[in-house]
Amino acid sequence: MKLGYTIVYVPDVSASLAFFENAFGLKRKFLHESGTYGEMDTGETTLSFAAHALGDMNFPGGHVHADESVLPLGFEIALVTGDDVHAAHAKAIAAGAREMAAPQQKPWGQTVSYLRCPDGLLVELCTPITGGEGG
């Protein structure tokens, strides 16, 4: 097994793709003509967005809409940036993200910040781990 996709159910797939392009500089890989599914080019593992309507079809009992939840879900994606988490964090906020935790250096040397995207997804921005424990 290997992780192939992370799929986030969102209210507007196109808006989520545009946000990730503007906030984090990621490239759009694919948007289905229906507008209900899209992917970002993030390397080996694909970050995907699917419309809540698809989630409703897949999960007849319903699912949590992160964009409607007061608290962030107990799930995050981590985007590893170069060495300037502060600049990446500020760019994401300018694009519409909400700050959850300002950039700070962890005891193991990694700089980490947390943001919440307009679609409700929790994102960690961090420098690479150079050894020791993770963030």
Image (tube, grey):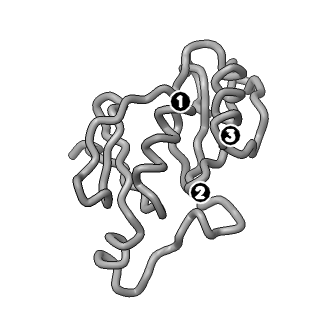
> Could you say which is closer to the camera, residue 78 or residue 42?
42
Number of the label disc, if any, that sits on residue 83: none
Q: Which callout, 3 or 2, points at the residue further toward the start of the chain?
A: 3
Give how far apart the Cα atoms at labels 3 and 2 are.
Answer: 12 Å
Quadrant for residue 13, please give it: bottom left
Point 28% across, 47% down: residue: 31
Point 53% across, 69% down: residue: 65
Q: Is residue 49 above or below residue 96?
A: below
Instruction: Estimate the x, y position of residue 99 in percent, counting from the top left.
Output: 75, 42
Point 70% across, 64% down: residue: 71
SS state under label 2 = loop
Instruction: Estimate the x, y position of residue 33 in percent, counting from the top left.
Output: 22, 54
Q: Is residue 95 left or right of residue 46?
A: right
SS state under label 1 = helix
Q: Which callout, 2 or 1, points at the residue further toward the start of the chain?
A: 1
Which residue is identified by label 3?
Answer: 114
Which residue is identified by label 2?
Answer: 120
Identify which amino acid the numbered label 2 is placed on. Gly
Of all residues, the one furthest to the bottom in this rendering is 61
Q: How many marks?
A: 3
Give how far apart the Cα atoms at labels 2 and 1 are.
Answer: 16 Å
> Could you say which is closer to the camera, residue 99 or residue 93?
93
SS state under label 3 = strand
Q: Which callout, 3 or 1, points at the residue further toward the start of the chain?
A: 1
Identify which amino acid the numbered label 3 is placed on. Tyr
Give how far apart the Cα atoms at labels 3 and 1 are.
Answer: 13 Å
Which residue is identified by label 1?
Answer: 24
